[in-house]
Image: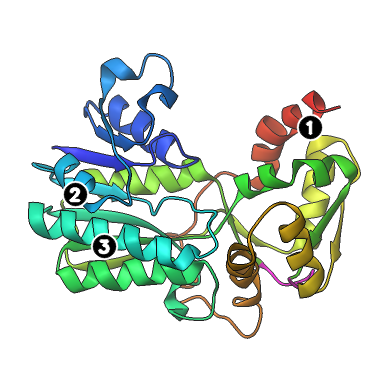
Amino acid sequence: MRIAVTTPTGNVGRHVVAALVRAGVRPRVLLRDPGRLAPGLHEEVDAVRVDQYDADAVAAATRDIDALYWVDPSTASADPLADYARATAAVVRAVTENRIGRVVFQSSVGAEKRHGAGEIDGLAHTETALDATGVHVTHLRCGYFFTNLDLQLDAVRAGRLHVVLPLDQPMAWVAPRDIAEVAVTRLLSDAWSGRCVQAVHGPADLTWREVAEILTAATGRPIDVERITDDAMHAQLRDAGMPDGMADAVLGMSTGLREDFVPEQPRTVRTTTPTTLAAWAYDHLRPLIADGG
């Protein structure tokens, strides 16, 4: 089976690549800088230098591919939804032109809203565009990544996280490695067809209060969480260097799922994955905090 993987050095993609290699597959990996691949991996993959916004390059890199793991590339521009649209156009052309049989797309809980969820709207656009091609596609509706906490290391070290969601509102939290496991099983399986939506919810829905308690126990440092206003969060994002459009899109991912949002897929044994936030925080976050003093 010929499988292509985008963002192969990302939080999920690197686990997808490693699992495929262990399964005996030599994946074709598409990335801007092949030098970022992990040592020893070059001998196990076919690396192609690709800008995912370049439709010509994506189409050329995915010729003769049976299955594709597609992740819309990250963006930090003033118009992130326009960037998502460009990436979507590239994958649609590749799937159509190369008659790729199966696509597993890394989407997000909230994409079912289609509009009003900030940056997630870009993922919703990719979903609908892939659906229109008629390709066999699985949309992975992923919960909130544990690794999003890596972006808040300074706040974790300071012992106070700032959020705009109600502190007692539960949401799905998931380990990227678990998302990769679900993705790889889909990529290697021919037991599904048509349009599928597969939620990946992690082991439990957690409130931010519960997250703070878990992080405190796992890191050995007291960590609290405070709800702040939307304007205050927007100012923090701008102070971090985000242009207005990007800050709006990032903030919208929270505000769009804050009021009366119910995920399309309820939590079931099929959507529940095993890695707990406590285990991940102890193994991954605790050393990072210790290294930072």
**Image quarter of the N terminus:** top left
Across and down, in percent, residue 77 comes to 53, 57
**Is residue 168 a member of the stretch shown in magenta?**
yes
Q: Is residue 227 magenta?
A: no
Does 204 appear above or below 254?
Answer: above
Report whether 258 appears left or right of 126.
right
Characterize the local packing of mark 1: few (<14), some (14-19) or many (20 or more) Cα atoms within 10 angstroms: some
The secondary structure type at the circle numbered 2 is helix
As drawn, the label of residue 89 is 3
Badge 3 marks a residue whose secondary structure is: helix
Q: Residues within 10 Å of mark 2 (few under 14, many from 20)?
A: some
Amino acid at the residue labelled 3: Ala
Magenta residues (range): 165-170
Q: Earlier in the sequence, mark 1 or mark 2?
A: 2
Residue indicated by mark 2: 56
Q: Is residue 109 above or below residue 13?
A: below
Q: Nearer the viewer, mark 3 or mark 1?
A: 3
Q: Is residue 199 visible?
A: no
Q: CA distance from mark 3 to mark 1?
A: 40 Å
Between marks 2 and 3, how big is the CA–CA gap? Answer: 10 Å
Where 109 sits versus 280, above or below? Answer: below
Q: Quadrant of residue 254?
A: bottom right
Between 214 and 13, the residue placed more toward the observer is: 13
Q: Is residue 289 visible?
A: yes
Residue 289, numbered label: 1
Q: Earlier in the sequence, mark 3 or mark 1?
A: 3
Amino acid type, mark 1: Ile
